[in-house]
Image (cartoon, grey):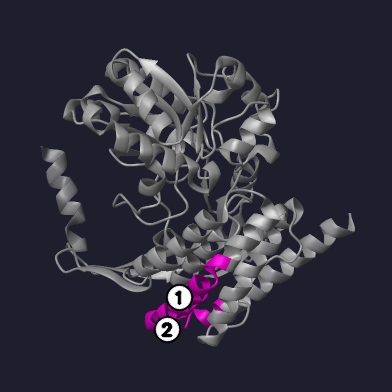
Amino acid sequence: MYEDLESIADARRCAERGHEAWLKFRSFSPEQVDRIVSAMAKAAEREASSLAELALVETGYGNVEDKRLKNLYNSRVVADWLLNVTTLGVLWRDETTRVVAIGESMGVVAGLIPVTHPTALVIFKVLSAVKAGNAIVLAPHPRGARASAKATEIMAIAAEQAGAPRHLVQCLEHASVEGSQALMRHHRTAVVLATGGANMVKAAYSSGKPTLAVGPGNVPCYVDRSSAKRLADIADGILTSKNFDHGTGCVCEQAIIADRPIADQLRQEFRQHGGYICSSREAEALAKVLFTPSLGIVADSVGQSAETLAKQAGFDVPPGTRVLLVEQDGVGRAFPLSAEKLSPVLAFYEVADSAEGLARSREILRFGGEGHSAALHSEDSDVVAAFSSLDAGRVFVNVPCMHAGIGFSADVEPSFMLGTGTLSGSITSDNVTAMHLINVKRVAYESRPWRTMADLFEKGAQR
C-alpha cells in the first residue's frame, strides 16, 4: 500500500517538475533544441553496450547484442533523422493560399516503457519528445525499471550539460501501475506516449488525455511461388528478423504462409539456415510453454532463445537453432500458436495459391494483429496489389519485417512505435515520430474578400 502511495506521489512530483522545465524550455530556439538532442543521442550511443547488458540482466529477455543494436539504432539512425526534420517554428509556408504552419510543443509527455524494450524505447521517446520541444516523464515497467532509469539518467545529464532546464527528462523512481496511471491522468500531463501490453494501452486510452498508443502485432508473411529463386535469402531474412532480440519485436513475422509449389523447398531452406520444424507432439508441448490455458502469454517464455524454449518443452534441437517452426492448419483460440508470440517461434501454413494465402493472412491479422503489419515475398505485381488490401498499416514486400518496420530496410519513418490505426483502437497507423508530438498552428491571411460571401451564396441559390 505504502509503495503505491509513494509511486503516486512520485508521479505527481515529476509531472509538476516537468511542467516547470517545459515552461523554461519553450523559449529555446530550434537550434538550441537540436544541440540538446544531439548531446543526448551521443551520450546514449556511448552507453549502448552497458545499457544492453543492464536490460538483459534485469529482465532476462532477449540478448545483449541485439539490445545493443536497438540502442544504437535509436541513438544514431533515429537521432540523425530527427536532426534533419523541422518540428518547431515555421514548418511550411504556402504563398498561394497565404497560410503559414508553425510547430509548437505540447508540454509534458508521459512515456510508458514496456519490459521488452526498457532502454531502446527510453532513448527513442526521450529524443522524440525533446526534439518536439517537450518535457518527458518515463513510466517504466517494474521488471525493467532499473535499466530504464539508468538510460533516462544518462540522457538527462547530457541534456542539462547541453543547457536544458533541470527535470526536462525524468523517470519515475517508484515504478508501478498506480504510478503510471497517476502520471497519465495528472493535469500537467499533455499527452501520453504508450507502448506495452493490451491492458496498459487500454489504460492509456482511458486516462482522459490525448494518447498515442500502439497495439499488438500478429504479422502474417506470405511467400509466393514467383519467389522460388530467392528462397534461401528469404528464409535467412525471416529467421534473422524473427530471432532479433529473441522475438520481442511486435513487428517481426509471426506466421509464414507458403505457396504449395515452393513449400517443401522453403522448409528445407529454413532447416539450412537455423530453423527447426517441430513435430505435432513438440508443437503441442511448446504451446503450453508459451501460453496459459486462457491464451495469455507466459511471461517467462518471452524473449528466450529457441534452444531454451525447446528444453522447457521437453525436446532437443540442433545446436545453433535460431527459430522453432510449428506447422498449423487453423487460426484462432483452438490454435494457440497462431497468435502473437514474443519469442523465436513461427507458425507455418501451406496454401494452394495466393488467393488462399491472402485469405489466411486476413484470418491471422483478425486474430490479434489488425492494423499492424503484414508482409509478402513475391515477384508478381498482381499478387502484391492484392495483398496491399490487407487491414494492416504497413505491408512489406521482399524485405524482413523487423528491419523494414523500424525504418532501416524500408523508407518508412525511423521509429520504435508503430501505430496500428483505428482497427485496433489506435489514433494513428503511422510510424510515430516527433512530428506526432507537436501542435501545428496556422497563421492565415485573407484569401477571398469576406464581403463576397453573401453574393456567392445568392448566386448559388439562383442556380
- Disc 1 residue crowd, few under 14, some 14–19, many 20+, Cα 10 Å: many
Q: Amino acid at mark 2?
A: Gln
Left or right relative to 94: residue 204? right
Residue 180 has which mark? Answer: none
The reply to whether residue 33 is visible in this rendering is yes
Mark 2 = which residue? 32
Q: Residue at x 52, y 62 (%)?
A: 125
- List x then y, in percent, for residue 201: 59, 44
Q: Position of residue 406 (x, y in %)?
A: 40, 51
Q: Is residue 222 left or right of residue 242?
A: left
Q: Quadrant of the N terminus?
A: bottom right
Quadrant for the C terminus, please.
top left
Q: Is residue 220 visible?
A: no
Q: Main secondary structure of the magenta part?
A: helix
Describe the element under mark 1 as helix, strand or loop.
Answer: helix
Residue 51 point in image, percent of width and height: 59, 65
Which quadrant would residue 238 be assigned to in this image?
Answer: top left
Q: Is residue 63 above or below residue 351?
A: below
- Residue that lies at the very extreme toward the front in this rendered image: 319
Q: Secondary structure at mark 2?
A: helix
Residue 268 placement, left or right of 23: left
Q: How many marks?
A: 2
Residue placed at 66% from the left, 32% from the top?
311
Q: Which residue is mark 1?
A: 37
- Magenta stretch contains residue 65: no
Q: Given the image, on which type of amino acid does mark 1 rest?
A: Val
Name of the residue lying farthest toward the right: 2
Q: Mark 2 or 1 closer to N-term?
A: 2
Tell me the distance, in whole angstroms, between the alpha carbons under discs 2 and 1.
9 Å
Q: Position of residue 87 (x, y in %)?
A: 37, 69
Q: Please report the bounds of the magenta region as a residue range.
A: 22-49
* Occupied quadrant, residue 136: bottom right
